[in-house]
Image (cartoon, helix red, strand yellow):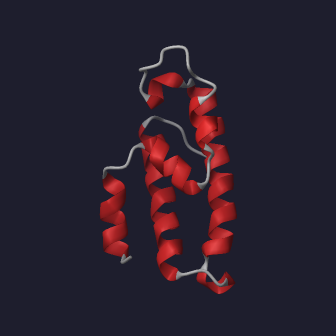
Amino acid sequence: MSLARTRFALRGRRITQLLMALGLPRDELYALKIEPPRKHFWARYDEYELHDLLVRAHEAYRQRIKLAHPDRGGSVGEAAALNNCWKRVREMFKRRGVEL
């Protein structure tokens, strides 16, 4: 997949889809916060939980990029997709005031 196509494909993705693409398990994103079932992602977590989630996402990204990097035998397309996904996640968290 080309870099331009990867960027376009990530634009409409939800934050939960992006976090799962980075390697966070689905049950980590949904199992703990069930109280109001229809609350959107950003309202489910307070600032500290969001920061913790961003740290875990960064760790997951680092593990996956080590395997996907072309210097380690991965493909350029997979590494580019992971990098774009991580960039998008960082931007979405930054808009809400959460940074590493």
Q: Kindly indicate the quadrant of the structure image that contains residue 26.
A: top right
Q: Residue at x 54, y 81 (%)?
A: 75
Q: Residue at x 57, y 27 (%)?
A: 47
Q: Toward the viewer: 100 or 7?
A: 7
Q: Is residue 44 above or below residue 98?
A: above
Q: Toward the viewer: 48 or 26?
A: 26
Judged left or right of residue 20, residue 64 is right
Q: Toward the viewer: 81 or 87?
A: 81
Q: Position of residue 60 (x, y in %)?
A: 66, 55
Q: Toward the viewer: 35 or 70?
A: 35
Q: Residue at x 48, y 35 (%)?
A: 97
Q: Kindly indicate the quadrant of the structure image that contains residue 28.
A: top right
Q: Residue at x 60, y 80 (%)?
A: 74
Q: Position of residue 73 (x, y in %)?
A: 65, 84
Q: Is residue 89 above or below residue 49?
A: below
Q: Position of residue 23 (x, y in %)?
A: 61, 54
Q: Position of residue 25 (x, y in %)?
A: 63, 45
Position of the N terminus, as image quadrant, is bottom left
Judged left or right of residue 69, residue 83 is left
